[in-house]
Image (cartoon, rainbow, N blue to C red):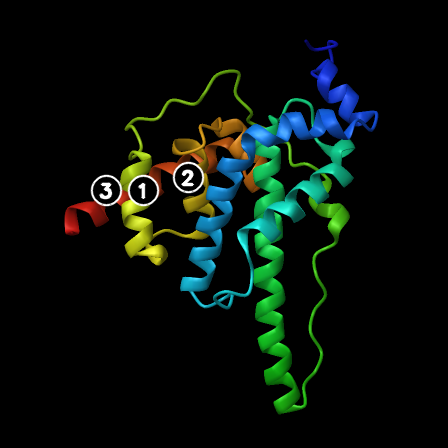
Amino acid sequence: MSDGTGVTAEWQAVLDGDKEAFSRLVEPLVPELASAAREELAYFVEIGDIPADRYAVADILAEVVLRAWRNRRRRPPQVSLKAWLMAVLYRIIDDIAVRERRRQEVAEAVREQHPEIPPFEDEDAFWEWFQPDDLPLAEPFMPEEPPSPEEIAAVLETRPRAIGTAARRALVMHRRHGIAIGEISAVLRRSVAETRALIEEAGKRVREQRKAD
């Protein structure tokens, strides 16, 4: 039950430091988070941004839980726990990809005697949760139903580059994880209109690839 601010009694216990309450809320979401982490790793390994076999799904999940607990007071009450944890997961994967790309850049820079590498994005900036200006009261209308999770998986398994990262995440969150478009827009830091367009474009790409097979 909410206290009127969108904070349930159980989440208030989490905010007050109850780790058992936190575990009870997070544990049912672990299978979906593991699936998302596995897909993200496979994608970035396939495009060459992350070395194969360097990172384990279990380690990434442990980092998601650790960061979520540490930053639990920064979760907006109007954003579901699942969407918020997905945002944390994507940030961790992106950090890994950036770190690995920079590892390669440093190696090349050393060879070229050019060691200066730009810094990481400020961590605090990530936790300043994006609030879309066009957040709708109801789920936006989709003129054409997006592809099924099975169709999406079939395309991404064989053609991981067929859809851009943001569009792929938007489509997977919407169709496989059942996250509302408004929440997806907050996770991706885009407007609701942009997010809907991403989902539509990604769905179109999946359908095109399925027809080509």
Q: Which residue appears at 54% of the width and 51% of the height?
A: 57
83 to 13, vertically: above or below: below
Which image quarter holds the N terminus?
top right
Instruction: Determine contact: label 1, label 2, CB under 8 Å.
Output: yes
- Residue 140 image-quadrant placement: top left
Residue 130 visible: yes
Q: Position of residue 149 (x, y in %)?
A: 33, 36
Q: How many marks?
A: 3
Q: Position of residue 183 (x, y in %)?
A: 55, 29
Q: Which residue appears at 60% of the width and 46% of the height?
A: 61
User: SS of the residue at dot 2?
Assistant: helix
Number of the label disc, if any, that sits on residue 152:
1
Give the residue at mark 2: 172
**Is disc 3 surrounded by few (<14), some (14 to 19) or many (20+) residues within 10 Å?**
some
Q: Amino acid at mark 1?
A: Ile
Q: Amino acid at mark 2?
A: Val
52 horizontally vs 128: left or right: left
